[in-house]
Image (cartoon, helix red, strand yellow):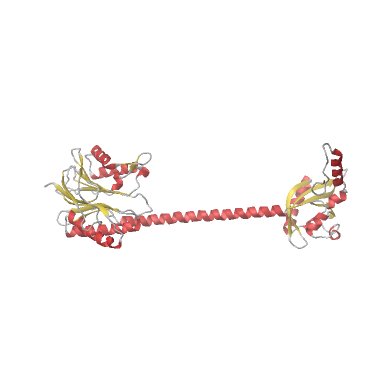
């Protein structure tokens, strides 16, 4: 039997004689044949670079004839322009100083004109007196290595380009997000008053928390004068988010303002809004609705009590912090969502605000904030009532500040927009117009 390639297979155990014979058959090539047919290129040059000897392997790689090379060309004649430049500026000076070089990358020039990437090692042979005699050079074909390196470089450039494009896309997305947030903030502000007006005999304060800066919310509020010394106010929350909610909020605000000017009765204003929303949205099979609480306040000033009338359509009850330290809700039972039914039931309530009393309206983002590690528990009205008792008595701005800190304490448990509106009678009325406060 023979091994692959015709090498005899040693027979039996300890067949050293057969093995030695096989290797002898392989090694019987002469040194000249080994030099000429080596898997790498060999050449020797004089110290001036004239080629004295070159093997067949390198000649075949370059497509040259021995007669045209040996004794007729210098080593640099076999190099490309770039290779010659590198040889003169780096290769030759280093070789003279060090006596040898290993693994230098150069490009040799084929007869066909194309470059041959190679790795070159060179050593200077010295005579018995130490004088330099010739230069021995070994040449390895680096075409595959160069192709691999070029592929790596190409992939790296592609990755860098992709990374740069991704970075630019992220920058553009961030810029777009900022522009969108700015535009939404402007639009959101257009849905609520820029500031609250000064109301003689009252102090006011407001706060609006936006849960998502990249999404329009549906909470709204307003405060404006109506007939005589009376002032109308409202606060509510429309269904949904985004542009549709913004459209519904705008319609709701201006409908309530117009209705309150026409008939300054809270229940009448809500009935008008219910009719408008039901007619506008129910017919197309996409009903839109809101919760809302509307009030009329008649400041008494120094001459009488401040009276408040409220009407609610499915909205959380108003909260009053009394000057004696009590806190109480003003229930408006029976009120349903505005816009769902042709004739929605509306709950009403009345109260009197004494000096130091504060009325607070809020949307359900406050009471439905989620608590606990798993965000499974709602804050709720009981907790809000306890919070109000703890802070009573307090003026509108003081109450709003405390509630704002409470909202911030919820962290990511506060996932809905929240509007807060507070009206109060100063504890110590002044002849000067009381201050009106607005926070956002």
- Horizontal side of 107 relative to 208 (left or right) equals right
397 or 251: nearer the viewer = 251
223 or 336: nearer the viewer = 336
14 or 143: nearer the viewer = 14
In the displayed orientation, state which residue is furthest to the left: 303
Tell me if residue 277 comes above or below residue 328 in the rendering: below
Residue 170: where, in percent of width, then height?
Answer: 48, 54
Residue for point 83% across, 45% down: 8
- In this rendering, the count of numbered labels is 0
Residue for point 86% across, 60% down: 67
- Horizontal side of 87 relative to 364 (left or right) equals right
Residue 12: where, in percent of width, then height?
Answer: 83, 38
Residue 440 in view here? no
Tell me if residue 31 comes above or below residue 390 in the rendering: below
- Horizontal side of 136 relative to 342 (left or right) equals right
Residue 241: where, in percent of width, then height?
Answer: 34, 54
- Location of residue 182 (image quadrant): bottom left
308 or 70: nearer the viewer = 308
Residue 336 in view here? yes
Residue 195: where, in percent of width, then height?
Answer: 27, 53
- Horizontal side of 357 relative to 18 (left or right) equals left
């Amino acid at each position: 039997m023979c091994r692959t390639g015709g090498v005899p297979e040693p027979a039996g155990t300890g067949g050293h004689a057969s093995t030695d014979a096989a290797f002898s058959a392989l090694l019987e090539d002469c040194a000249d044949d080994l030099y000429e047919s080596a898997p790498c290129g060999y050449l020797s040059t004089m110290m001036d670079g004239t080629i004295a000897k070159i093997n067949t392997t390198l000649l075949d790689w370059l497509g040259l004839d021995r007669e045209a090379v040996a004794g007729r060309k210098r080593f640099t004649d076999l190099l490309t322009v770039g290779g010659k430049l590198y040889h003169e500026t780096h290769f030759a000076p280093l070789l003279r100083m060090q006596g040898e070089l290993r693994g230098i990358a150069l490009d040799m020039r084929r007869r066909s004109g194309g470059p041959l990437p190679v790795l070159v090692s060179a050593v200077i042979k010295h005579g018995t007196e130490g004088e330099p005699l010739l230069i021995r050079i070994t040449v390895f074909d680096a075409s595959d290595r160069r192709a691999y390196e070029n592929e790596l470089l190409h992939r790296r450039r592609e990755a860098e380009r992709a990374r740069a494009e991704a970075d630019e896309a992220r920058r553009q997305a961030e810029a777009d997000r900022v522009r969108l947030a700015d535009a939404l903030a402007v639009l959101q502000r257009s849905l609520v008053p820029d500031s609250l007006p000064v109301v003689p005999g009252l102090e006011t304060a407001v706060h609006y928390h936006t849960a998502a800066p990249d999404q329009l919310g549906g909470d709204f509020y307003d405060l404006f004068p109506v007939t005589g010394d009376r002032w109308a106010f409202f606060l509510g929350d429309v269904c949904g988010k985004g542009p549709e909610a913004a459209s519904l909020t705008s319609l709701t605000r201006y409908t309530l303002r117009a209705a309150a000017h026409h008939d300054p009765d809270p229940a009448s204003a809500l009935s008008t809004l219910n009719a408008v929303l039901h007619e506008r949205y129910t017919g197309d099979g996409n009903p839109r609705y809101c919760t809302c609480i509307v009030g009329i306040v008649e400041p008494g000033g120094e001459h009488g009590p401040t009276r408040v009338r409220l009407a609610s359509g499915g909205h959380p009850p108003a909260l009053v912090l009394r000057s004696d330290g009590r806190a109480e809700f003003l229930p408006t039972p029976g009120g349903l969502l505005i816009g769902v039914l042709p004739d929605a039931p509306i709950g009403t309530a009345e109260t009197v605000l004494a000096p130091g009393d504060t009325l607070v309206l809020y949307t359900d983002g406050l009471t439905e904030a989620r608590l606990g590690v798993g965000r499974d528990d709602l804050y709720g009205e009981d907790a809000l009532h306890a919070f109000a008792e703890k802070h009573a008595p307090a003026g509108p701005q003081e109450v709003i500040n405390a509630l704002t800190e409470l909202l911030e304490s919820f962290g990511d448990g506060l996932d809905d927009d929240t509007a807060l509106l507070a009206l109060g009678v100063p504890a110590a009325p002044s002849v000067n117009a009381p201050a009106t406060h607005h926070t956002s």
